[in-house]
Image: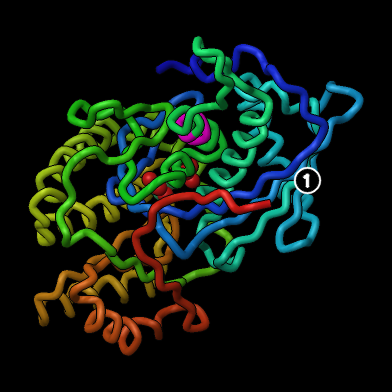
Amino acid sequence: MTEKDFIPKTYTNSVENGTATWSSPSNIALVKYWGKKDNQIPANPSISFTLDACKTTTTLTFSKKERNDDFSFEVFLDGEKKYDFKPKIETFFKRIENYVPFLKEYHFVINTKNTFPHSSGIASSASGMSALALCLMSVEKQLISIVRSSGVETSLDENHFNQKASFLARLGSGSACRSLEGDLIVWGEHKEIPNSSNLFGVKYPFEVHENFKNYHDTILLVDKGEKQVSSTVGHNLMHNHPFAEQRFAQAHNNLSKLIPVFKEGNLKSFIDIVESEALTLHGMMMTSMPYFILMKPNTLEIINKIWRFRQDTGLHICFTLDAGANVHILYPENEAQEIYEFIKTELVAYCQNGHYICDRIGFGAKQLPI
Ligand code: PMV
């Protein structure tokens, strides 16, 4: 597949107006994407658990407009008009215009809501961009009907629909391309993962042991403020980073190592890889120029407590981090009761206002009825 394969040939149908609603989850990377080339091409492959409870629901309403010279849209979050969301969506529309050429023909009303608070420090860009990309694909689906050689009219096939939605979501926010399906998604070319692509996320194709079914992710909200350094700036600091090449090679290597780990259910090795990835991500931030730190003192308190508890109990609790201070605590279903008890009694005290979110591995986006 190349970018060109996502440019539609012609739209066969004319549609005046309509609406589409999709609900799309967030995801948490196990092998991290950090560093990109032009056009949102990742510098290394990544893999993530799709989440379940943290999600964005977006309704897109579209109506034909008279002139096709510019984008026209309004955005609402929880029913409130959000002018500050517009520049990001405008950039997204510019990037995807070639692939969804109907964009300037309609006025769009984008109504969006998250299950998690907007100012929780949890990035809504993955769930938000994937929900919007799926809504746009639902518009495209109405504009295309394909006449097969049998003479039967069909619509876009599901595989192309999902692949293109992931492709579009990537152009909104890289990690968003891993939010459409579940429960383990790979994004970025990797020699051992057939059909892996830099252009869109694909389902992890190999065997996954029972140990990883229903895996938990309890997200401790350590700092709900706006990040001092955006991920766009962070990614760019990987250009000319002294350790960039080693880091990209390490990500390839860690993804290779995870293949037997997933197959055999080896939780000990899983923990080693996942925690190392999280700390390497933050290590890259601390060693870029300019350097920066997104962890807070409570992030480190929590990590130390997790290590102590793991040593004392032998339970398979581990942490990962995204580009912020919040801590994702990952643990298997059959140890959930004891670990959750520990989180409530020992760790919640480190969260801002005691806030945390109980999530688990999920299976991707869903279209909601009109
Ligand atoms: O999708 P972006 O550009 O917000 O980058 C996200 C990067 C990390 O969350 C830090 C890692 C990842 O792979 O999700």
Is residue 40 among what the camera can see?
no
Point out residue 326 in the picture as x, y percentages from the top left corner.
42, 66
In the image, residue 27 sits, relative to residue 80, either above or below, namely: above
**Three-letter amino acid code of the residue under disc 1:** Val
User: Which is the main secondary structure of the residues drawn in magenta?
Assistant: helix
Judge left or right: residue 258 versus residue 174: left
Numbered disc 1: secondary structure: strand
Q: Within the magenta stretch, is there residue 165?
A: yes
Q: Residue, x 30% and y 44% (percent of image)?
A: 47
Q: Residue, x 23% and y 66% (percent of image)?
A: 318
Question: Relative to the observer, which residue lies in front, 361 or 128?
Answer: 361
Q: Which residue is mark 1?
A: 109
Magenta span: 162-166
In the image, residue 262 sits, relative to residue 12, either above or below, namely: below
Q: Residue, x 84% and y 21% (percent of image)?
A: 69
Q: Residue, x 80% and y 45% (percent of image)?
A: 74
Point out residue 46 in the picture as x, y percentages from the top left corner.
31, 40
Q: Quadrant of the N terminus?
A: top left
Which residue is situated farthest in the right direction here? 66
